[in-house]
Image: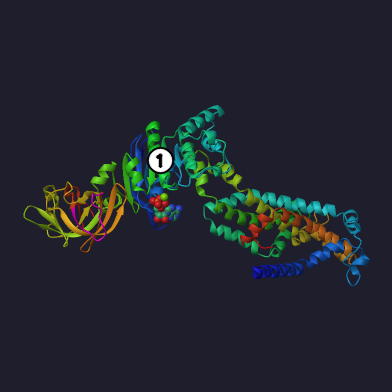
Amino acid sequence: MASVVLKNVVKRFGSTTAVDNLSIEIKDKEFAVLVGSSGCGKSTALRMIAGLETITSGEIYIGDTRVNDMPPRERDVAMVFQNYALYPHMSVRENMGFGLKIRKLSDKEIDERVREAADILGLNELLDRKPKELSGGQRQRVAVGRAIVRKPKVFLFDEPLSNLDAKLRVAMRAEISKLHRRLEATIVYVTHDQVEAMTMADRIFIMSKGVLQQSGAPMEVYSRPVNRFVAGFIGSPAMNFIDATLVRGDGGLIVDAESFKVALPEAFNASLAGYVGRQIVFGVRPEDMALAGNGVSGEQNILTARAEVVELLGSEVFVYLSCGRHSIVARMEVPDRAIEVGDTLQVALKMPKTHVFDKDTSLTIA
Amino acid sequence: MNKKILSNVLFYIAVVLIALVVLFPFLWMLSSSFKTQVDIISWPPKLFFEPTLANYRKVFEEQDFLKYFINSTIVGGFAVALSLLLGLPAAYSIARFAQKKLAVFILLARLMPGISFLMPWYIIFSRLDLMDSYVALVLSHMLIALPIVVWIMSSYFEAIPRELEESAMVDGATRQHAFLAIILPLSGPGIITATTLSFIFSWNNFMFSQVLSMEKTKTLPIAVYNFLSYAEVDWGGVMAAAVAIMAPAIALTMIFQKYVVKGLTMGAVKG
Ligand SMILES: Nc1ncnc2c1ncn2[C@@H]1O[C@H](COP(=O)(O)OP(=O)(O)O)[C@@H](O)[C@H]1O
Ligand SMILES: [Mg+2]
């Protein structure tokens, strides 16, 4: 096991900069998730760690070793690819043993390790099958198995679950988390799915357009996003962003969005002092909203809106609201009296959990 | 429903007619090779006749066609084998490292008329005392085989996901090892296509052997051609010889039909 450190790593393909000055430090045994939308450079970052892409500039360390110029085979990492990349002409057993055979382990030891991994992943029955005789989920397991038999310093996963159906994905998510605890391995895991990131990571690294936006524990990036991108990326449905003006009211600062006015808690005052009278972006998560009179009290946190679309999910309901020129999504418990399209609702915001962003820089102010 | 049957019937009639036109010379040749001289020149042509193997006997016993047959096989075999040896790695690096210019250069070698190479070859091989040697002939036939191998195989390799060899390389293999252990075993169909096509083109080639060979290494087409010139009247023999030349090409094509069609439709090779 080992740590992984990237220092000011840049990767250019011709004129596109796929990864821009990326500096991250992944601790030994940590489950690190690189997350971001498609094309943001996550795979490129991972492939540079694996040695499959050269580095335009910067440094990469695995453990204490600088690996910039080291070929993939010497880095002692294992990678699980998005398309699994199983060798079609080899059986599951041979696929899993391939890396060990190259490293000249004895047949006995190869057999033992393959068996051990097959036990962990429930692949025992499938060892003599060819990849094409396996289902998507089984292939995915074999790909993971091929990585764990190697007992590498670092595991690299590139969107390993994105080709699975939703149910299997949830199951594999839990299994990979379990595997991480069992192997006590350093894992760098790439995904575009923020739910995967939130549920599996010890630490999340959020990237956009090749640039690292924020890193931190899942709850930290959720509750204290550093900018509007992170705030919108983490959480589902995404945070509502409302253009508004910040004004001073009787008690404190007020967000004036024309069609509604809400008062910010006192704790926001200090950081917002310079923004009074200016345009800001007000952010509130759908899950930080509730029907008024349902536990959230106070008068200065309520907006009146019309329900345009109602999506019932069983235990929860997504309500798409219109409030003046603003469209707002709320995610709430299902109320006793059903919400109908066209209803006018009193919606209370959990003000301490809201955010204020600079309109120009998109950075979080409060 | 009836309309559909009718259009099907018309379609097959058209196909048969076209096939007849295209195949007529071949059928003529095939039937003539089993006819006596009298039957061949009789008018109107005889559809039913007593077949004879005399022509073939003559070709293989008196004219020693077997020797030329073996020459063609040696030249084609070695040219294809060496072309695979050089062409597979070349095609792989073209596919993986986007060597488009190199690919075009190799295609250019293929598109240049072969005759333009003959003069320099003639001089070079004469000086090296390699006229009428297998070495010279195999080298010249590699000009036919190598571009076919490179062109077909580079498209073939491009279609194999890179992740396969990347995975092998992360697993501890060198690129060469990944190529040999992962990519090549998956390339069987492509290699069969390339081998069949390049062997057939080598087999059919007339010009190189005509200039670079004398008696020892003469290939089959030259032998038939020579046969024609001094035995003008022996149509039966000529036809039998022509059938003997075509037979291996046709057999290969039929055996590997699937692969050959694929290779030809890659648009990369042209006879
Ligand atoms: N081999 C390559 N050649 C040119 N551009 C590339 C190459 N690989 C990736 N890119 C570009 O780099 C950017 C990041 O790609 P990638 O790392 O694959 O994104 P992600 O995995 O986050 O979806 C994209 O704009 C992509 O087009
Ligand atoms: Mg990717």
**Beta carbon of the mark 1 residue lies under 8 A of ligand 2:** no
Residue A159 against residue B120 in the figure, above or below:
above
- Looking at the image, the residue that sits furthest to the left is A250
Prevailing secondary structure of the magenta residues: loop
Magenta residues (range) = A334-347
Q: Nearer the viewer, residue B192 or B154?
A: B192
The answer to whether residue B66 is seen in the rendering is: yes
Looking at the image, which is closer to me, A250 or A103?
A250
Task: Tell me residue A227's x, y (percent).
Answer: 25, 52
Which one is in front, A41 or B68?
A41
How busy is the neighbourhood of tag 1: few (under 14 within 10 Å), some, or many (20 plus)?
A: few
Residue A199 appears at what percent x and percent y?
33, 41
Q: Chain of mark 1?
A: A
Which secondary structure lies at badge 1?
A: helix
Verify whether residue A345 appears in magenta: yes
Farthest top residue?
A: A108
Q: Disc 1 designates what residue?
A: A171
Placement of the N terminus of chain A among the 4 image quadrants: top left
Q: Is residue A44 left or right of residue B236?
A: left
Q: At label 1, which amino acid type do we have?
A: Ala
